[in-house]
């Protein structure tokens, strides 16, 4: 006892731990680490008081963020203490420490302990010992509380019968605790809900109001997952609604009835009257809000079968509006938030309410300037019910000012709400689409809404696509956005003000740039009309010669492809494609300018030859950079565009000999072709219904080549009708088609020259290969993609490319000439005598002959090695699953990391709710729905056997053994000496061997013996020692006389009697 007192004096209590943490502010982690080490030593003590003190301190540290899962077993030990004070500490530590009970094996140890506590609640404690009667009730309460925190599927299945039995306990303290614990058990063990549903319904009629309130709470939470299961309880809850005076229980009843209305619409009209009376009579704000919210849920279902509304419909709606208005005007932020939520639910069924109550609209707009972001967000969601054609412009203007001042997620929500209000019901509220385009341009330049860029881009393209009158203005605004990105551009908002914009002011969302480029390219024929305004600066930089040139400079700027901050690859691909469309429009505009003789270029806003020459020069210069992109889409579009420009006769680079007039003449000649290829006609919108109809009809029927060619205007491809060395004017192949071979391999010579006769076609001249004009050799050498004419001729007549000599030794290119069969397949010369041939063949090939050496391994050995590698990989994977590895044994004890308490994730919780919602309570219990039972397996007892039957069985066994012995005797060999246990021959012990008959003495005649039957001293010694009866071996061909058999039987009897006598003598001597 003195030792226990000394321990309690020197041990740190919870107060000491808290005081030490506060005093060690600089080295708190070190102090806590030392305290945890002391706690681990205290938990090893056999004393319950010491363990309880340690668990108290550890529970406090767990609330600070330190894990205590390693002390779960000690908590279970303290839980088994008979003292209530210690037991309470153990249960609290178990609730806090077992934060992941599904993964802890210690939970299995608590099953019998919890079961014992629950069963002990019905035992009346003897009061003679000083304990109060019913103390076990509080022990059971601790167990129920612990079970609700550490419940698992196995625990729920094992303890469900005890919990249901607790529902009939005489104490309401136990009944309500067991009822609330059942909900946590159902989350882990959903099947238990079907087994216990009937008993839960009976709790609604319990005489104690607290038990009824707990039953209502449990059913309300369960009905939230699947309300259909609890429709039969609607009469009972309606009775509670009209008779109960407990506000907290009425709140749950109102919520439950509101959730049942969608499942049973007829319930809505019946609830209007009692709920309205409750709104008028109650002063409790919580019950008042729940009643109004339930009314808003009932309003969509109150229509009668003939379509008429109830008589009190208008009165009920006015009552709800007045109540919610009082909530919003209250100074309490919580009530203000609830009022906005209630209005959101009311407006779903009554969308015109705010138009009839202008004072409510003012309160909601005031909430947009509230400091609380949650209130601003709720008020923002109500603006769509307030917007009309008249007030949309004013409302959006105010919201745009809020966008500039807002930040974070609320800023993005403002942008979403602006676009949602303007685009609702196919833009029914938008009167001026030019104004809406300006709004989108303003939003495109706002910083901090990068996540909404795609939404703005889709809206911009959709408006330009669907609204024809706004296309010209959309092209103008898109041109401004693209051009202002250059060093000489101006800010969009500064247009007309005469002020230049800074680099930081020209910010636009990167997702909006492809939309602007698509609008400019798709409707490029509207560029002259879009720029026909005063004060519009259309210069990208100092070298810009016009709007077309400025647009091409903006969409093919080298800095966008290879600068410090290049644009995304999808944006570059859109830029390259639409730059070609703008160039096509410039060519067409130049044709129209040349045809307009009576108007000046300024009045016509045409495209001059200098501007067209600058456009072509910029494209040919910048497309080379884009063609070197790592993105395949950008590279393909740039390369195709570059080759298309080469095909119409444009020079590959700047040349002083090429004039602007010649370039413009070439472009005018190809204007019709470029327009037909790039922008044949403007794209038209397709409605969603039409798209669904086309999808339902399935894929179109196959179209033949002739039918497809009917819609092609072949006049624009005038160059294709010229006579070439291979085709005539009608497109027929010259010469015999049989001369053209696609199967012969062409030799890949390093010189790159192959005779034209290899394919049987005459080599054409260089002039014939240039239908669009002569390209000089000097210009061709400067082409970044090689000599086009040589490449075309080489590909046509079989000449190897001129770059083939550069590929020699390059491992990424393979030679196309055939490899000798001897080198690859071991043909002639592949044997032992063909070493020189193999070496020669290997020298002719590029990489030589590949050989595979097994290295002396068989397939079995390789398979074994693979299995070993797999096993080793599995071991390494298991080792990697560990979280941390301690360097020493002391490190794990002293080094403590502050970890976050492991809690059930949202996914796991949602899965539990989903499993609970799948339980069907509408069907009766089946044969498989049986309450689980925990019973020990009892081995069934064998039926008693009568002694006479046992005696008969024993006799039968003895007879069987004798038969087996006799059968073995008959099968034993006769060559062995009679009575010889070891099977030795009689001659080894000096017995005479009889080969010939000899005269026998008279004694021998009296007792005749056979050959080998002479007594052996070794055999007799074994007989005396072991007390065995040795069988007499008889030859099968000789029959022993009766006298000999009788003498042998007598000898055996005498031996048995002597053995029995010797045994008795030995026993007596021992005694």
Image (cartoon, rainbow, N blue to C red):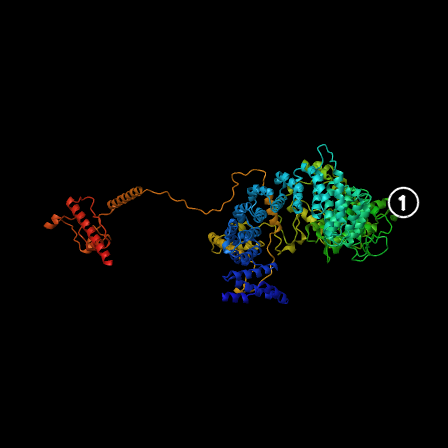
Looking at this view, name the residue that lies furthest to the top.
Answer: 306
Single out the residue that lies furthest toward the front.
Answer: 128
- What is the residue that sits farthest to the left in this orientation? 1002
Image quarter where the C terminus lies is: bottom left
For image coordinates 68% across by 52% down, the residue present is 631
Judge whether residue 1027 can be spotted in this image.
yes
Residue 798 place in picture, x, y as percent: 66, 48
Q: Is residue 326 above or below residue 66?
A: above
Image quadrant in which you'd find residue 18? bottom right
Tally of numbered tags: 1
In the image shown, does 124 or 1 lie closer to the viewer? 124
Q: Is residue 932 above or below residue 778?
A: above
Which is nearer the eye, 903 or 1046?
903
Q: Report which residue position mark 1 lands on.
A: 598
Q: Is residue 504 left or right of residue 897?
A: right
Of 602 and 115, nearer the camera is 115
- SS at circle 1: loop
Question: Looking at the image, can residue 572 be seen?
Answer: no
Where residue 1026 appears, as percent x and y from the top left, is: 24, 54
- Residue 731 falls in which quadrant of the image? top right
In-image side of 745 versus 136 (left or right): right
Where is residue 134 drawn, in percent x and y? 53, 51
Query: Going by the image, does 270 lie left or right of 215?
Result: right
- Label 1 Cα crowd, 10 Å radius (few <14 / some 14-19 / many 20+): few
User: Is residue 532 rendered to the left or right of residue 218?
Assistant: right
**Residue 84 screen position, x and y as percent:** 54, 56
Please tell me which residue lies in front, 96 or 5: 5
Q: Residue at x 70, y 53 (%)?
A: 629
């Amino acid at each position: 006892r003195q030792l226990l007192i000394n321990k309690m004096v020197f041990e740190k209590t919870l107060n000491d731990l808290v005081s030490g943490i506060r005093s060690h502010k600089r080295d708190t982690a070190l102090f806590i680490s030392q305290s945890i080490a002391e706690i681990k030593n205290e938990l090893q003590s056999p004393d319950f008081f010491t363990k309880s003190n340690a668990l108290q301190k550890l529970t406090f540290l767990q609330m600070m963020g330190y894990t205590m899962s390693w002390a779960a077993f000690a908590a279970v030990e303290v839980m088994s203490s008979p003292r209530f004070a210690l037991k309470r500490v153990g249960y609290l530590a178990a609730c806090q420490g077992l934060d992941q009970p599904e993964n802890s094996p210690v939970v299995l140890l608590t099953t019998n302990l919890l079961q014992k506590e629950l069963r002990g609640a019905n035992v009346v404690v003897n009061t003679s010992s000083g304990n109060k009667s019913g103390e076990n009730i509080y022990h059971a309460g601790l167990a129920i509380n612990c079970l609700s925190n550490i419940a698992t599927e196995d625990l729920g299945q094992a303890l469900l019968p005890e919990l249901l039995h607790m529902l009939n306990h005489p104490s309401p303290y136990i009944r309500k605790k067991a009822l609330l614990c059942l909900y946590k058990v159902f989350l882990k063990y959903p099947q238990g809900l079907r087994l216990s549903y009937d008993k839960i319904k009976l709790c609604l009629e319990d005489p104690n109001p607290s038990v009824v309130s707990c039953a209502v709470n449990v059913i309300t939470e369960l009905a939230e997952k699947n309300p259909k299961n609890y429709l039969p309880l609607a009469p009972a809850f309606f009775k509670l609604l009209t008779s109960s005076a407990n506000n907290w229980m009425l709140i749950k009843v109102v919520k439950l009835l509101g959730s049942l209305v969608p499942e049973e619409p007829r319930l809505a009209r019946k609830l209007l009257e009692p709920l309205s009376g409750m709104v008028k009579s109650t002063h409790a704000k919580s019950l008042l809000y729940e009643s109004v919210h339930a009314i808003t849920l009932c309003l969509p279902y109150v229509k009668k079968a003939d379509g008429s509304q109830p008589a009190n419909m208008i009165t009920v709606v006015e009552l709800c509006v007045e109540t919610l208005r009082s909530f919003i005007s209250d100074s309490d932020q919580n009530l203000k938030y609830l009022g906005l939520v209630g209005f959101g639910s009311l407006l779903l069924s009554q969308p015109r309410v705010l138009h009839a109550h202008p004072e409510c609209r003012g309160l909601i707009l005031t909430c947009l300037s509230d400091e609380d972001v949650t209130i601003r967000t709720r008020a923002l969601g109500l603006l769509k019910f307030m917007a009309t054609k008249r007030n949309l412009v004013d409302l959006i203007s105010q919201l745009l000012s809020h966008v500039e001042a807002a930040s974070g997620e609320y800023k993005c929500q403002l942008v979403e709400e602006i676009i949602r209000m303007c685009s609702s019901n196919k833009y029914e509220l938008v009167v001026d689409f030019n104004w809406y385009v300006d709004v989108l341009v303003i939003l495109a330049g706002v910083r901090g809404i990068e996540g909404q860029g795609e939404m703005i881009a889709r809206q911009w393209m959709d408006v330009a696509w669907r609204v024809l009158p706004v296309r010209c203005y959309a092209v103008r605004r898109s041109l401004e956005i693209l051009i202002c990105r250059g060093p000489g551009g101006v800010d969009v908002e500064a247009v007309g003000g005469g002020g230049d914009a800074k680099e930081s002011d020209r910010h636009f969302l990167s997702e909006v740039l492809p939309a602007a480029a698509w609008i400019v390219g798709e409707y490029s024929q509207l560029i002259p009309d879009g720029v026909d305004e005063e004060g519009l600066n259309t210069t990208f930089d100092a070298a810009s010669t016009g709007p077309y040139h400025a647009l091409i400079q903006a969409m093919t700027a080298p800095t966008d492809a290879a600068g410090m901050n290049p644009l995304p690859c999808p944006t570059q691909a859109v830029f390259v494609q639409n730059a070609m469309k703008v160039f096509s429009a410039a060519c067409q505009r130049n044709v129209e300018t040349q045809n307009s003789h009576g108007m000046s270029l300024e009045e016509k806003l045409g495209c001059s030859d200098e501007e067209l020459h600058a456009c072509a020069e910029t494209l040919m210069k910048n497309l080379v950079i884009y063609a070197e992109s790592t993105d395949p889409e950008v590279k393909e579009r740039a390369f195709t565009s570059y080759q298309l420009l080469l095909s119409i006769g444009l020079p590959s680079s700047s040349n002083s000999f090429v004039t602007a007039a010649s370039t413009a003449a070439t472009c005018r000649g190809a204007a019709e072709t470029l327009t037909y290829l790039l922008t044949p006609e403007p794209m038209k919108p397709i409605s969603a219904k039409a798209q669904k109809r086309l999808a339902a009809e399935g894929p179109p029927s196959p179209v033949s080549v002739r039918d497809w060619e009917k819609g092609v205007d072949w006049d624009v491809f005038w160059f294709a009708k010229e006579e070439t060395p291979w085709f005539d004017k009608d497109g027929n192949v010259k010469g015999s088609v049989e001369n053209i071979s696609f199967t012969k391999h062409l030799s890949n010579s390093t010189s790159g020259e192959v005779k034209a006769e290899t394919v049987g076609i005459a080599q054409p001249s260089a002039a014939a290969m240039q239908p669009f004009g002569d390209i000089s050799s000097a210009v061709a050498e400067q082409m970044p993609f090689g000599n086009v004419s040589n490449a075309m001729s080489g590909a046509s007549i079989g000449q190897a490319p001129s770059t083939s000599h550069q590929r020699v030794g390059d491992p990424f290119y393979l030679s196309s000439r055939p490899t000798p069969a001897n080198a690859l397949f071991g043909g002639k010369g592949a044997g032992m005598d063909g070493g020189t041939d193999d070496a020669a063949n290997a020298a002719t090939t590029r990489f030589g002959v590949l050989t595979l050496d097994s290295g002396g391994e068989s397939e079995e050995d390789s398979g074994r090695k693979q299995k070993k590698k797999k096993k080793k990989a599995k071991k390494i994977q298991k080792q990697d699953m560990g979280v941390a590895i301690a360097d020493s044994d002391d490190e794990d004890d002293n080094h403590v990391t502050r970890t976050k308490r492991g809690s059930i994730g949202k996914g796991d919780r949602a899965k539990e709710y989903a499993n609970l919602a799948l339980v069907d309570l509408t069907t009766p219990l089946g044969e498989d729905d049986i309450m689980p039972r925990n019973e020990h397996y009892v081995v069934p007892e064998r039926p008693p056997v009568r002694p006479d039957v046992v005696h008969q069985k024993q006799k039968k066994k003895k007879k069987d053994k004798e038969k087996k012995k006799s059968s073995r005797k008959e099968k034993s060999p006769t060559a062995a000496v009679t009575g010889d246990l070891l099977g030795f021959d009689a001659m080894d012990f000096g017995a005479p061997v009889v080969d010939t008959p000899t005269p026998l003495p008279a004694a021998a005649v009296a007792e005749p013996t056979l050959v080998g039957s002479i007594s052996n001293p070794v055999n007799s010694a074994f007989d005396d020692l072991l007390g065995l009866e040795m069988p007499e071996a008889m030859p099968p061909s000789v029959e022993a006389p009766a006298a000999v058999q009788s003498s042998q039987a007598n000898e055996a009897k005498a031996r048995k009697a002597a053995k029995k006598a010797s045994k008795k003598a030995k026993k007596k001597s021992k005694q």
